[in-house]
Image: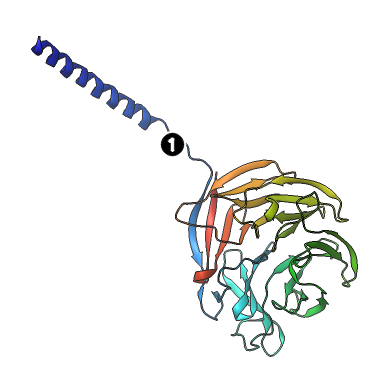
Amino acid sequence: MKRILILLLIVTSVISCKKEEELKKEDELIPEVKEPHLIYESTFGISGTGLGEFRLQQGNVYPGTFALNSTNMFIKDIHNHRIQRVNLDLTPVDWFGYNNNWGFHTQAVEGADSITPRNIFLKNNYLYATQSMINRILLKVNLQTGQIEKRYKFNLFVNSFAVDGDHNIYTYETDNHILSKYNDNGDSLISWGGYGSAIGKFNTVDPQIIIDNSNNIYVCDAGNKRIQKFTASGQYLSSWTVNVNSTIYGSFDIYEENIFIVEGNFLSKYDLNGILLKKYEIPFSYFIQNRFKVYNTNKVIVEYSYSNEFKVFKMQD
């Protein structure tokens, strides 16, 4: 009887091993299906003062690190007191700031604290930049000449701003959580908002503001974990919930009329009505620290301020 039982156990074991081998072969034949994810491609920038070298604000939480047009990307270089211009392959071109005179230069900065750009924005062939972190002055720079055409001074502490297609400026005033609109002359037009969680109210310190091609305004209301959408006249249109990583600020971007935002371990892609289109998993070994920019169809550049560098990822479907 014992011999029969031992024989049965041996036969059962052999059959089980064969089935496992067959299942393994079947699994090998089935192609692995990966969810959309980000693939690391390269690192750009090092510490220093030359072209392509940066002295960033460590732990930067301020929006507006990048500005983009069809040929160039502009990157704020806070502690080198300049804004660097690079090609879309990230080859350094020059920088805007003060070096005996205002304009675009290639030599090291000499005008020590002439500009400490906290936030930059690009619209209609003009580069807009906050001149310093405390003096509340916004510069309007002609990209062709490098000359400052206008200086705007705001009464309240402005962390975030954006510019629409008609040269109107939208600012978020941190002191009172108010979104204000000014014309190209700096005249106040309308204001809306205030602190709170109701529709049209805000609960965030450093929100990012983006504008679509129809001049609709989007505000990342991080404390309320939502994106709010308004018309250019301040009329509330809609909002949707986002799982931002901070209740103080949210990092989001608009590219080809889609909105991208970091949610947990994913870079999410929404349409302009808040419909989720895709989620790209962020590699575990990398952390999208603060600010990013989508460019060249499927590339994402991310600021890593503690190491004075930027990492480039590819969105893989």
Q: Please state if 11 lies on the left or on the right of 132 as rendered.
A: left
Q: Considering depth in this image, is 83 or 307 the residue closer to the camera?
A: 307
Q: How crowded is mark 1: few (under 14 residues within 10 Å), some or many (20 or more)?
A: few
**Which quadrant holds residue 213?**
bottom right
**Which quadrant holds residue 84?**
bottom right
Q: In the displayed orientation, state which residue is furthest to the bottom.
A: 100
User: Which colour assignment does the render follow?
Assistant: rainbow
Where residue 136 appears, as percent x and y from the top left, is: 76, 76
Residue at the location (58% across, 44% down)? 279
Q: Please state if 237 lies on the left or on the right of 106 as rendered.
A: right
| The C terminus: image quadrant | top right
Where residue 156 appears, as percent x and y from the top left, is: 80, 72
- Name the residue beneath numbered marker 1: 32
Q: In the displayed orientation, state which residue is furthest to the top.
A: 1
Residue at the location (85% across, 64% down)? 181
Identity of the amino acid at label 1?
A: Glu
Q: Note whether residue 24 is visible.
A: yes
Residue at the location (77% across, 80% down)? 147
Q: What element carries label 1?
A: loop
| The N terminus: image quadrant | top left
Q: Considering depth in this image, is 221 or 168 the residue closer to the camera?
A: 221
Where residue 53 appears, as percent x and y from the top left, is: 54, 76
Where residue 253 appears, as percent x and y from the top left, is: 67, 56
Q: Note whether residue 255 is visible.
A: no
